[in-house]
C-alpha cells in the first residue's frame, strides 16, 4: 500500500461491492454482451455453458465462472484490454446508482481509503475502479499468460476471500472490524466483509439481508432498478448473455 493510501486508511475505509451495489446489473453478462456483439461467433459458448450449468452443485461458483468465461477463448490480452476500456467508458459511469455514487464521493471528499471489492473479473474491475476514482480495485483474478484458455484458472473473489485479500493489503480487522470502516453491499455473500466493518449500508437487500441490516442498524437504500419484476430481469439477463 502506498504512503498516500496508508494515510487515507488512517482517516477511514470505505469498501464497495460492485454488481448490484454500485450498479444494478450482473456485469459479467453485460461485458459478455459487449464482446458477443463484436464477435457473434463467440455465442457458441452458450451451448457449452448450457451443458455445464446443471452441474453447478459440483462445480460451484468458481467452476461455473470458469465455464462462463469460455466466450473469451483465445482472446489476447491487448484485445481484451481494448474491449474493457470501451465497455467501461460506455456502460459504467451513467448506469451506477446515483445514491450510492454520492456515498462514494462523500468518502473520497473525507479523504477515506476507497476500495472496490468485487467478485467480477479483475481484468475489468480495475478499469471500473480507475474510472470511478477508487484508490484500490480488487476482483476475481483470471490467469492469462498468452491467449485466454477455454476454462481459465481463477480465484473467485467472493465471501471470505474478499476479507483475506483485503487483510493482506491493509491488515487484519480487529475485534470490532477495521477502524473507521464502512461497507456497502447488496448480497449476503458479502457478510464476511460487512461484519469486518464498523458501519454498513445495504442496497436493495433481500428479505434476509434486510432483517440482518435492521438488527445491526445498517442503512438501507432502495434505488430504482431498470427492470419490472423478476421475470423481466431474467429476460434481460438472458438477452445480454446471448449477445442480443
Image: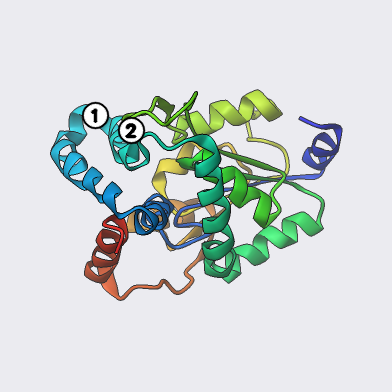
Q: State left or right for residue 99 relative to residue 62.
A: right
- Point out residue 102 in the picture as x, y percentages from the top left corner: 66, 66
The quarter of the picture where the C terminus appears is bottom left
Q: Say few, some or many: other residues with alpha carbon within 10 Å of mark 2 (under 14 / 14 to 19 / 20 or more).
A: many
Residue 142 vertical position relative to residue 114 in the rendered view, above or below = above
Q: Which residue occupies 81% across, 42% down?
A: 8
Q: State left or right for residue 197 relative to residue 53.
A: right
In this view, the residue in front, 191 or 16, is 16
- Point out residue 7 in the picture as x, y percentages from the top left corner: 85, 38
In this view, the residue in front, 150 or 29, is 150
Is residue 137 visible in the rendered structure shown here?
Answer: yes
What is the tally of numbered marks visible in this picture? 2
Q: State left or right for residue 71 relative to residue 192.
A: left
* Helix, strand or loop status at disc 1: helix
Q: Say few, some or many: other residues with alpha carbon within 10 Å of mark 1 (under 14 / 14 to 19 / 20 or more).
A: some
Q: Which residue is mark 1?
A: 59
Residue 99 vertical position relative to residue 160 in the rendered view, above or below = below
Q: Which residue occupies 35% across, 52% down?
A: 39
- Point out residue 65 in the picture as x, y percentages from the top left corner: 33, 37
Q: State left or right for residue 131 relative to residue 64.
A: right
Residue 75 vertical position relative to residue 105 in the rendered view, above or below = above
Q: Which residue occupies 19% across, 39% down?
A: 48
User: Contact (CB < 8 A) between labels 1 and 2?
Assistant: yes
Mark closer to the observer (1, 2):
2
Is residue 194 visible in the rendered structure shown here?
Answer: no
What separation in Å lies between label 1 and label 2 (alpha carbons)? 9 Å
Q: Which residue occupies 39% across, 25% down?
A: 153
In this view, the residue in front, 20 or 205, is 20
Q: Which residue is mark 2?
A: 66
Amino acid at each position: 500500500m502506498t504512503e498516500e493510501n496508508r494515510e487515507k486508511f488512517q482517516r477511514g475505509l470505505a469498501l464497495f461491492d460492485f454488481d448490484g451495489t454500485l450498479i444494478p446489473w450482473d456485469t459479467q453478462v453485460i461485458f459478455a454482451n459487449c464482446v458477443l456483439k463484436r464477435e457473434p461467433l463467440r455465442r457458441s459458448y452458450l451451448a457449452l455453458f448450457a451443458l455445464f450449468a446443471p452441474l453447478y452443485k459440483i462445480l460451484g461458483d468458481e467452476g461455473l465462472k470458469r465455464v462462463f468465461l469460455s466466450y473469451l477463448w483465445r482472446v489476447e490480452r491487448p484485445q481484451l484490454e481494448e474491449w474493457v476500456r470501451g465497455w467501461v467508458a460506455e456502460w459504467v459511469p451513467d448506469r451506477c446508482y446515483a445514491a450510492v455514487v454520492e456515498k462514494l464521493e462523500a468518502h473520497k471528499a473525507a479523504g477515506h481509503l476507497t476500495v472496490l471489492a468485487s467478485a467480477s473479473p479483475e481484468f475489468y474491475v480495475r478499469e471500473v475502479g480507475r474510472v470511478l476514482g477508487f484508490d484500490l480495485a480488487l476482483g476475481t483474478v483470471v490467469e492469462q499468460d498468452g491467449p485466454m484458455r477455454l476454462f481459465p484458472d481463477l480465484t473467485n473473489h467472493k465471501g471470505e476471500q474478499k476479507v483475506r485479500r483485503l487483510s493482506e493489503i491493509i491488515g487484519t480487522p480487529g475485534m470490532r472490524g477495521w477502524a473507521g470502516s464502512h461497507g456497502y453491499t447488496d448480497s449476503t455473500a458479502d457478510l464476511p466483509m460487512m461484519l469486518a466493518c464498523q458501519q454498513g449500508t445495504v442496497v436493495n437487500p433481500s428479505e434476509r439481508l434486510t432483517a440482518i441490516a435492521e438488527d445491526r442498524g445498517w442503512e438501507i437504500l432502495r434505488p430504482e432498478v431498470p427492470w419490472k419484476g423478476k421475470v423481466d430481469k431474467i429476460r434481460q439477463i438472458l438477452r445480454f448473455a446471448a449477445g442480443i
